[in-house]
């Protein structure tokens, strides 16, 4: 994701003379009764945290367990890939969950299969992008990132965050300006799981993470992760101090909540280091 104070502008805002409506276009307020991608209130449905097709390809079909690696956490049983436990609570309309994102879903599944095969062979999974099909700026290349943008937007909505216009417009194909970056590699949690259980059936997600600028104290990025078997994707967006300031001013409760979660996480990490 780059250094903490490296900024990538999601959308350009005039430094002076900006109209209020222009500033407001950067965000749309969170509404649990509207699509978290386009804002429609019609034909709302749910989006999988991990693609249903991926779950079916990774798991044998036996009842699955859902949980975390947190001490004391109790796993839950999921009967199939259609289980509600695999869905975001944030809503997506039927159009955004089908025609507007179907090409991205299909392309990401194709890319993911190739990347997992490369990792299984001991190669760098990111070299899947070396396939001429994924030439920089091509439709297949953008569709891989559109899928990740959709997942990230759903994670933001899941915790009550606003819609980022640049992110959701890219996710549903209204824009070709890609704000998402990704890193790929082996997931240590998979290896831990496999070493202790001998079970290669594993998938997961990282929820929503936020980064903050040490210089300004403002949020300057969002990130998440997906794990498909042994392969882990770390992906996110970064933005400049103007966007961070706008987020704090227009959505202070959300920004404060992110800051508190980050502070608690840092405190827990410090305590763990001292205990070690």
Image: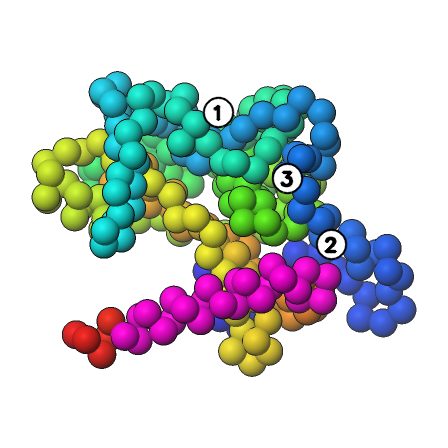
Q: Is residue 118 above or below residue 240?
A: above
Would you say the residues marked 1 and 3 are in contact, meaning their CB atoms lie under 8 Å apart? no
Answer left or right for 40 relative to 70. right
**Nearest to viewer (mark 2 / mark 3):** 3
Q: What SS does tag 3 mark? A: loop
Local packing at callout 1 (Cα closer than 10 Å; few below 14, some 14-19, many 20+) is: some
Is residue 133 visible to us here? no
1 sits left or right of 21 in the view: left
User: Measured from the top left, where is residue 151 in percent x and y?
Assistant: 51, 40
> Regarding mark 1 in the picture, which secondary structure is present there?
helix
Residue at the spot of label 3: 32
- Mark 1 or 3 closer to N-term? 3
Q: Which residue is identified by label 1?
A: 106
The reply to whether residue 158 is in sight is yes
Pick the residue in front: 118 or 75: 75
Is residue 251 a member of the stretch shown in magenta?
yes
**Which callout, 1 or 2, points at the residue further toward the start of the chain?**
2
Residue highlighted by disc 2: 26
Q: Residue 3: x percent and y percent?
A: 47, 70
Disc 2 and disc 3 in contact, CB within 8 angstroms: no
Image coordinates of residue 229 in percent, x first then y, are 26, 36
Q: Look at 47% across and 52% down and name the residue there.
A: 208
Q: Residue at x 39, y 48 (%)?
A: 206
Residue appearing at x 24%, y 71% in the figure: 272
Residue drawn where x is 22% and y is 31% of the image: 201
Which numbered disc, 2 or 3, marks the residue that appears first in the sequence?
2
Question: What segment carries the magenta color?
Answer: 248-271
Gap in angstroms between the C-alphas marked 2 and 3 = 19 Å
């Amino acid at each position: 994701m780059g250094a903490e104070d490296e900024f990538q502008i999601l959308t350009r805002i005039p430094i002076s003379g900006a109209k209020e409506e222009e500033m407001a276009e950067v965000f749309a307020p969170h509404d649990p009764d509207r699509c978290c991608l386009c804002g429609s209130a019609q034909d709302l449905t749910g989006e999988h945290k991990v693609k249903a097709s991926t779950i079916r390809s990774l798991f044998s079909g036996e009842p699955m367990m859902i949980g975390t690696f947190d001490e004391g956490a109790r796993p839950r049983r999921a009967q199939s890939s259609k289980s509600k436990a695999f869905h975001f609570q944030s809503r997506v309309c039927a159009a955004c969950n089908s025609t507007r994102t179907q090409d991205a879903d299909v392309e990401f599944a194709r890319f993911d299969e190739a990347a997992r095969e490369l990792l299984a062979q001991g190669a760098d999974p990111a070299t899947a992008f070396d396939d001429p099909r994924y030439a920089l700026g091509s439709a297949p290349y953008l569709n891989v990132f559109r899928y990740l943008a959709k997942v990230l937007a759903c994670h933001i909505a899941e915790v009550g965050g606003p819609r980022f216009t640049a992110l959701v417009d890219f996710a549903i194909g209204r824009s070709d300006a890609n704000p998402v970056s990704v890193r790929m590699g082996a997931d240590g949690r998979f290896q831990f799981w496999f070493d202790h259980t001998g079970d290669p059936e594993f998938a997961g997600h990282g929820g929503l993470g936020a980064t903050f600028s040490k210089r300004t104290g403002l949020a300057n990025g969002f990130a998440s992760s997906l794990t498909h078997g042994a392969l882990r994707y770390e992906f996110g967006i970064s933005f400049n101090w103007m966007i961070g300031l706008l987020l704090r001013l227009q959505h202070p409760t959300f920004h404060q909540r992110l800051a508190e979660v980050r502070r608690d996480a840092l405190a827990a990490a410090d305590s763990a280091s001292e205990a070690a």
